[in-house]
């Protein structure tokens, strides 16, 4: 007859000691290990370490990326509210003065000893299939094309299920707190706001760089009768927009181009928009990108940049985001982006923060993911579905806590004499802007 081990020798207690070393304090969540042992405060989210491989993975890849790899493979899980679990862990890490739990060399040595005692030592686990694998020089055209394809060519069916009928994969704009104001209403309000800021009139020539699935392109063509050139690197996106253009009879108003922004020729557009594409440009390449925006728009024409921002401590968004979602992404504080646009010759006339709006936007996408979980798993597999769960929950928290921001920046290319063409008031941008 076997005798149960004292609770303090269970795997959960050994792992908790390691986690407390990394956090610099008591474990704020409950922990359950593969042997059934548990420790930590009751009534909190439960971190479940399902196999020894999760610990082995952290030995080979300490920190955020190793934790993410263990989560997406199912070796590590969270029972209860994932957002609350992450919020609690990040809060404990911040008290120590870090953004995420950190593993020092000493922590790693202790972890190796614990892993040896728990039978978790072994060869490096295989990298999850959902992790990006890019080759070539940073921000070369071929590498940028592969980076965009990794995320945006997942499948049009996946994004149709995740997004509302606007197919807008960017921050919405809430003008109403009423319950019947939907996520789709917020997206349409955002699209209308962009068109008003750009002063689109019938026949105006709009260049939509990084057009996604064409939400702005189609809205500007249908609602404002603009002539739109839509540019994307993602083949799935280009095919979707072309299909929509045919169905809506917009062939004479919309031209869809699958190419790199660096290959765009011509110019003298009345307006240029780039919605959450500038994050993919790269740090060293951004001055040339800003110069291209200036070159492509006519004098007195307007440029709208909707772009995410982040402090200098994690300009790529963090190890998980860079490995699974947006490889080679670069974000900077909003003020630095404004400076780069001004250096290119654009006069910045308006900056509007939308940070809280992104929390609501992402939470809507997350609800859809959970409500249709089985459908998403059938489309892309459980590992990729778990990548998206972690991405959406973590992203919403990053905006909620101010670790990331998003802004609409409106600039103009002044005429040689300085004439901007701007009206004395921007009140009309917001009049009756409800998205419905």
Image: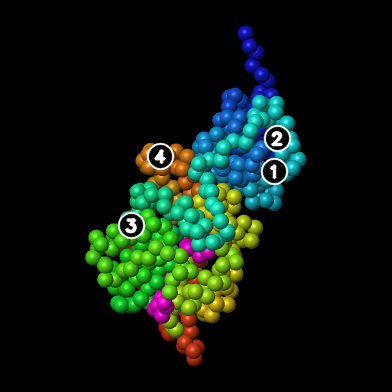
Mark 1–mark 4 distance (CA, rounded to whole Å): 33 Å
In this view, 139 is above or below 67: below
- Residue 133 is a magenta residue: no
Q: Earlier in the sequence, mark 1 or mark 4?
A: 1
The chosen color scheme is rainbow
Callout 4 secondary element:
helix
Element carrying mark 1: loop
Structural distance between the alpha carbons of marks 4 and 2: 34 Å
Q: Which mark is residue 287?
A: none
Horizontal and vertical percent position of residue 46: 56, 35
Which image quadrant for residue 284?
Answer: bottom right
Density class for disc 3 (Cα within 10 Å; few <14, some 14-19, many ≥20) is some
On screen, residue 270 above or below 141: below
Structural distance between the alpha carbons of marks 1 and 3: 44 Å
* Residue identifier under label 4: 377
Residue name at image x 43 percent, y 81 percent: 298
Quadrant the N terminus occupies: top right
Mark drawn on residue 103? 1
Cβ–Cβ below 8 Å for labels 1 and 2? yes
The answer to which of 12 and 325 lies nearer the viewer is 325
Q: Is there any visible trace of residue 57 in the rendered image?
A: yes
What residue appears at the point 36 percent right and 51 percent down from the top-left corner? 156
Q: Which residue is mark 2?
A: 111
* Nearer to us: label 4 or label 3: 3
| Dot 3: element | helix
Residue range corresponding to the magenta coloring: 266-281
Q: CA distance from mark 4 to mark 3?
A: 22 Å
Q: Earlier in the sequence, mark 4 or mark 3?
A: 3
- Of the two numbered discs 3 and 2 on the same chain, state the one appearing first in sequence: 2
């Amino acid at each position: 007859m076997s005798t149960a081990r004292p609770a303090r020798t269970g795997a959960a207690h050994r792992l908790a000691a390691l986690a407390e070393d990394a956090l610099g304090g008591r474990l704020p969540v409950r922990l359950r290990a593969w042997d059934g042992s548990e420790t930590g405060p009751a009534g909190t989210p439960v971190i479940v370490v399902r196999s020894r491989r999760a610990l082995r993975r952290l030995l080979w890849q300490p920190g955020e990326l190793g934790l993410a790899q263990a989560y997406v493979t199912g070796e590590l899980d969270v029972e209860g509210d994932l957002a609350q679990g992450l919020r609690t862990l990040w809060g404990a890490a911040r008290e120590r003065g870090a953004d995420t739990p950190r593993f020092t060399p000493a922590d790693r040595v202790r972890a190796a000893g614990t892993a040896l005692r728990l039978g978790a030592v072994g060869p490096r686990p295989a990298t999850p299939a959902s992790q990006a694998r890019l080759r070539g020089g940073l921000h070369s055209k071929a590498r940028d094309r592969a980076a965009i394809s990794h995320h945006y060519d997942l499948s049009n069916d996946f994004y149709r299920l995740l997004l509302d009928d606007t197919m807008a994969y960017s921050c919405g704009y809430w003008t109403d707190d009423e319950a019947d104001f939907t996520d789709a209403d917020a997206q349409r309000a955002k699209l209308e706001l962009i068109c008003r800021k750009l002063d689109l009139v019938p026949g105006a020539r709009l260049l939509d760089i990084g057009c996604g699935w064409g939400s702005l392109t189609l809205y500007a063509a249908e609602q404002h009768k603009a002539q739109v050139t839509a540019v994307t690197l993602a083949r799935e996106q280009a095919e979707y927009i072309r299909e929509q253009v045919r169905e809506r009879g917009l062939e004479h108003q919309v031209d869809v181009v699958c190419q790199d922004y660096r290959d765009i020729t011509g110019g003298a557009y009345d307006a240029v928009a780039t919605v959450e594409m500038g994050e993919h440009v790269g740090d060293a390449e951004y001055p040339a990108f800003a110069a291209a925006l200036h070159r492509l728009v006519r004098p007195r024409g307007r440029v709208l940049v909707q772009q995410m921002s982040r402090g200098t401590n994690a300009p790529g968004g963090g190890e998980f985001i860079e490995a699974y979602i947006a490889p080679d992404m670069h974000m900077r504080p909003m003020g630095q982006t404004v400076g780069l646009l001004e250096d290119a010759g654009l006069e910045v006339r308006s900056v509007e923060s939308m940070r809280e709006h992104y929390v609501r936007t992402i939470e809507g996408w997350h609800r859809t993911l959970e409500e249709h979980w089985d459908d998403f798993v059938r489309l892309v597999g459980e590992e990729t579905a778990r990548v998206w769960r972690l991405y959406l929950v973590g992203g919403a928290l990053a905006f909620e806590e101010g670790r990331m921001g998003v802004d609409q920046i409106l600039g103009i290319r002044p005429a040689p004499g300085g004439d901007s063409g701007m009206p004395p008031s921007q009140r009309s941008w917001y009049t009756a802007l409800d998205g419905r």
